[in-house]
Amino acid sequence: MASCSPFEDYQVGQVLTLSVIPEQGKQSSDSTVRARIRQLQNPRTLSCCMIVDLLGEDSPDNPVFLKLYDRRFSEQLRCDHGIDPWKRDTEKEYINAVRRGAARQFLYNLHTIPNFEEDTEETWDDGQNEAFLTSQVHKLFATETTVYDTLRDIQGKLVPRLVARGHLPLSLPDAGIGLADAAELLHIKGILLQYIDGFSLSKVQYHAPKSEWQGIVDQAVTIVQAVGDHGVLNRDVRPDNFIVQPAGGGCYRVFMIDFGLARLRGGNETDRD
């Protein structure tokens, strides 16, 4: 059963029902997990991030980090494309566009007609804007899951471990929307990641003694090199995208996070490209 209304924001304490595919080493078939929101993270940029507790007897990973590629509340994404903040009326318009088949036709045109975006974006209505944002967050999801697959051997060491990937079904009060359209255009893709309890590299001066700063930065540089050695080019390498975890005894471990703006290196490319 879906656990989230398309017309409501997320709330601390809310329980989300996710349809997920666990990663290798666990049950390989689709399954359903229930996650209670412990903490919401702000600001919301290209995705909605939160710390959640998985409910049930077989939930040894708690807490975990849930990243939902939700166009509704991806504030930076909407701003970058000049699209107004989400409203309930906006969602009604989009759901109507999905029901009528207009959203699917729009996306077909977007992906097949040369210069379609540049030639028509000034005339897009709310339904078309939301369809466009849907395509953008799907690209972010595909990029990030591809990168985590590529970095599988350093997951849990230099980057967080990918626990599962899947989607959050939305409860749709309106009839007339097929299952395929709902899954592709309305349900929210997401990933569950190992939660790294620490602080961002940008805040190191407030959380670690000065004597440890160089070693922490050296770890971050090593991670950048390791990620590059795996053929991943990340356009979003900055201090906020490193988490520093106190490891006891005055030691620290560093992890790189957030690969939505990364891509795999082409055959003739270098890190400088």
Image: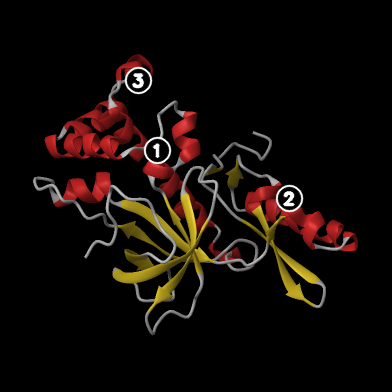
The residue under the point 29% across, 35% down is 90
Would residue 218 be visible to someone looking at this image? no
Q: Give the mark nearest the N terminus, 2 or 1.
A: 1
Dot 3: within a 10 Å radius of its alpha carbon, few (fewer than 14), some, or many (20 or more) residues? few
Q: Horizontal and vertical percent for residue 47?
A: 46, 47
In the displayed structure, does residue 19 sit left or right of residue 237? left
Q: Secondary structure at mark 3?
A: helix
Tell us which disc is closer to us: 2 or 1.
2
Q: Which residue is mark 2?
A: 202
- Tell me the amino acid under the disc marked 1: Gln
Residue at the extreme top of the image, as rendered: 119
The residue under the point 35% across, 60% down is 166
Cα gap from disc 2 to disc 1, whole angstroms = 28 Å
Q: Which residue is mark 1?
A: 136
Q: Horizontal and vertical percent for residue 176?
A: 9, 45
Dot 1: within a 10 Å radius of its alpha carbon, few (fewer than 14), some, or many (20 or more) residues? some
In this view of the protein, which residue sits in the foreground, 250 or 110? 250
Residue at the extreme left of the image, as rendered: 176
Give the answer, above or below, for where 115 lies relative to 162.
above
Give the answer, above or below, for where 236 lies relative to 79.
below
Which quadrant is the N terminus positioned in? bottom left
Which quadrant is the C terminus positioned in? top right
Cα gap from disc 1 to disc 3, whole angstroms = 14 Å
Q: Secondary structure at mark 2?
A: helix
Q: Give the mark nearest the N terminus, 1 or 3.
A: 3
